[in-house]
Image (cartoon, rainbow, N blue to C red):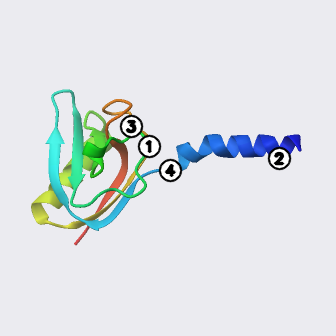
């Protein structure tokens, strides 16, 4: 019985950690960059299964840190997708760290389709 209770408690604690946003077959409608090196990529539709830390204003956005190599690559991909109108697929990390604890979910990856 003790094992069962422990397993249930651990499972409940991990549920919030594994949920991450995803979006597919949509377009980038806006890219926002800020003075501190952070940026947001806004999509044409809401992100599915977004992290619980996301506020309604940012249901269509993922956040990136452009001071990192990955953030620079994501910004480049987002601007390319916006300029070409290419369809994209993206996944989040399940947390909101780039802009603070209650804003937009951080981006894991962004893929452009022709």
Determine whether label 2 and label 1 are within 8 Å by CB. Answer: no
Tell me the quadrant of the picture where the N terminus can be found: top right
Which residue lies at the image location 38% right of the left edge and 58% below the top edge?
A: 48
Determine whether label 1 and label 3 are within 8 Å by CB. Answer: no
Label 1: element kind: loop
Q: Earlier in the sequence, mark 2 or mark 1?
A: 2
Residue 6 occupies quadrant? top right
Q: CA distance from mark 1 to mark 3?
A: 9 Å
Q: Earlier in the sequence, mark 3 or mark 2?
A: 2
Q: CA distance from mark 3 to mark 4?
A: 12 Å
Residue 52 occupies quadrant? top left
Drawn side of residue 8 relative to residue 99, left or right = right
Identify the residue under disc 3: 96
Q: Earlier in the sequence, mark 1 or mark 4?
A: 4
Label 3: element kind: loop
Neighbor class of circle 4 (other Cα within 10 Å; few <14, some 14-19, many 20+) is some
**Residue 19, x across and y down, in percent:** 50, 50
Determine whether label 4 and label 2 are within 8 Å by CB. Answer: no
Q: Nearer the viewer, residue 53 or 95?
A: 53
Mark toward the viewer: 3 or 2: 2
Identify the residue under disc 4: 19
Label 4: element kind: loop
Drawn side of residue 58 relative to residue 22, left or right = left
Which residue lies at the image location 33% right of the left edge and 65% below the top edge?
A: 24
Identify the residue under disc 2: 4
Identify the residue under disc 1: 52
**Residue 89, x across and y down, in percent:** 32, 63
**Residue 26 has which mark?**
none
């Amino acid at each position: 019985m003790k094992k069962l209770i422990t397993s249930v408690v651990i499972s409940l604690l991990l549920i919030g950690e594994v949920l991450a946003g995803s979006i597919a077959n949509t377009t980038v409608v806006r890219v926002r960059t800020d003075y501190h090196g952070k940026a947001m990529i806004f999509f044409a539709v809401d992100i599915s299964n977004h992290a619980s830390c996301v506020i309604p204003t940012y249901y269509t956005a993922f956040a990136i840190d452009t001071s990192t190599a990955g953030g620079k690559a994501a910004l480049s991909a987002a601007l390319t997708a916006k300029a070409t109108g290419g369809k994209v697929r993206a996944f989040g990390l399940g947390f909101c760290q780039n802009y603070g604890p209650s804003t937009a979910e951080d981006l894991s990856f962004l893929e452009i389709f022709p």
